[in-house]
Amino acid sequence: MKCRTCGKKASVNMRQHKLALCKEHYLEWLPAQVERFIQKYRMFAHDEKILVAVSGGKDSLSLWDILHYLGYQADGLYICLGIDSSTSLGASGGADYSAESQRLAEQFAAGHGLKLHIVNVQEQTGKTIPEWAEASLRGRGKPCSVCGLVKRHVMNRIARDLGYDVLATGHNLDDEAAVLFGNTLTWSGEYLLRQGPVLPATSGLARKVKPLFRLYEREMLAYALLRGIEYIYDECPFALGSTSIYYKELLNKLENDRPGAKLAFYLSFLEARKKGLFAEQEQVQQELHPCPNCGQPTSAPGLCSFCRMVKH
Ligand code: Q46
Ligand code: ZN
Ligand code: ZN
């Protein structure tokens, strides 16, 4: 297989794009793609301040790397969840997941001269994520819903308090297609409506964007490896056995037989939405009001779910 640009031996072959590239040209191609999507979906401009949610994994670190390379003003935010080897709740392995991912995020920031904000959930709320999950779920189920709630709250707060215009996350096409697949199986109109590469700023919350949403997981993996980015290889121990991993595997089977199917699935959804497939749901948007404690918009009467959880 030869590089389409220079004819040298290719390092990455992308069947879905009928494109093979050598290392040098792949490392030029991928950021150029990201720039094209930033423009096409009007994610942000060069004079805006961007906050990248960095987990220490390959996608978020690569996103930060690419935005820096493209000349955007992007700072990082690492949220320490307190997931370590003492974590119970049925998770196996993942020894010191949080400590190791924080070390890698800090190492990346220092190596590139970038600013990284660090928020420690335990210091801020008195408990780690597994402890919050234990307290609110009493050992039933995974801590992921609590974790998602806390991460969203912290990201919104930091973006608002420090004056960031945009919050960027490293979700790739495989992540987005798996969520879409799950929402489509149940035709969850409300969730489908909230899916997309750009969530406009509302009620004092920064705009949320996913600049990698059209890139396949394996394209991102190739980028991180070829760029020599050191990232945490293990997933969070609570991700093991999740339905989203199962959906990813199903979609990979489909992709294997029909290269490009995953991307087509996601892009057709965006197209259908643009044509008004969910117009009805769009009209019954929930009324939001600011939480009397933290000021973040919420649909719940009284305190938002985060403040309710932390106050108890
Ligand atoms: S970090 Fe948190 Fe994920 Fe771990 S506890 Fe679940 S939600 S799996 S992206
Ligand atoms: Zn080449
Ligand atoms: Zn609140």
Image (cartoon, rainbow, N blue to C red):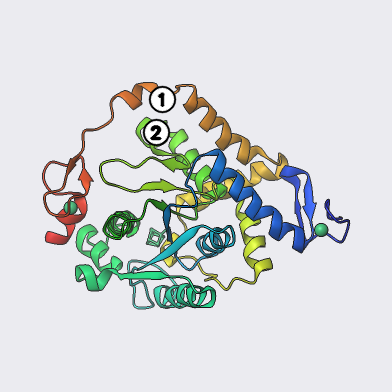
Q: Relative to the observer, which residue lies in front, 307 or 119? A: 119
Q: Relative to the observer, which residue lies in front, 49 or 197? A: 49
- Label tally: 2
Q: Give me the residue at 36% from left, 69% from top.
A: 117
Q: Can you identify the residue that label 1 sits on?
A: 278
User: Does residue 70 appear left or right of residue 206 in this picture?
Assistant: right
User: Does residue 168 appear left or right of residue 69 in this picture?
Assistant: left
The mark nearer the N terminus, 1 or 2, is 2
Check the image and report above or below for 224 versus 179. below
Proximity of marks 1 and 2: CB atoms separated by less than 8 Å: yes
**Residue 69 lies in what quarter of the image?**
bottom right
Give the x, y percent position of residue 42: 50, 40
Q: Can you identify the residue that label 2 sits on?
A: 193
Check the image and report above or below for 33 versus 60. above
**Residue 281 lies in what quarter of the image?**
top left
Which three-letter amino acid code belongs to the residue tagged 2? Leu
Where disc 1 sits, the SS reads loop
**Residue 264 lies in what quarter of the image?**
top right
The quadrant where ligand 1 appears is bottom left
Q: Relative to the observer, which residue lies in front, 216 or 250? A: 216
Where disc 2 sits, the SS reads helix
Which three-letter amino acid code belongs to the residue tagged 1? Phe
Give the x, y percent position of residue 118: 35, 71
Q: Give me the residue at 53% from left, 77% from top.
A: 111
Q: Is residue 215 visible to the viewer in this orientation of the structure?
A: no
Quadrant placement of the C terminus: bottom left
User: Does residue 255 appear left or right of residue 58 in this picture?
Assistant: right
Q: CA distance from mark 1 to mark 2?
A: 7 Å
Give the residue at the far front of this rendering.
47
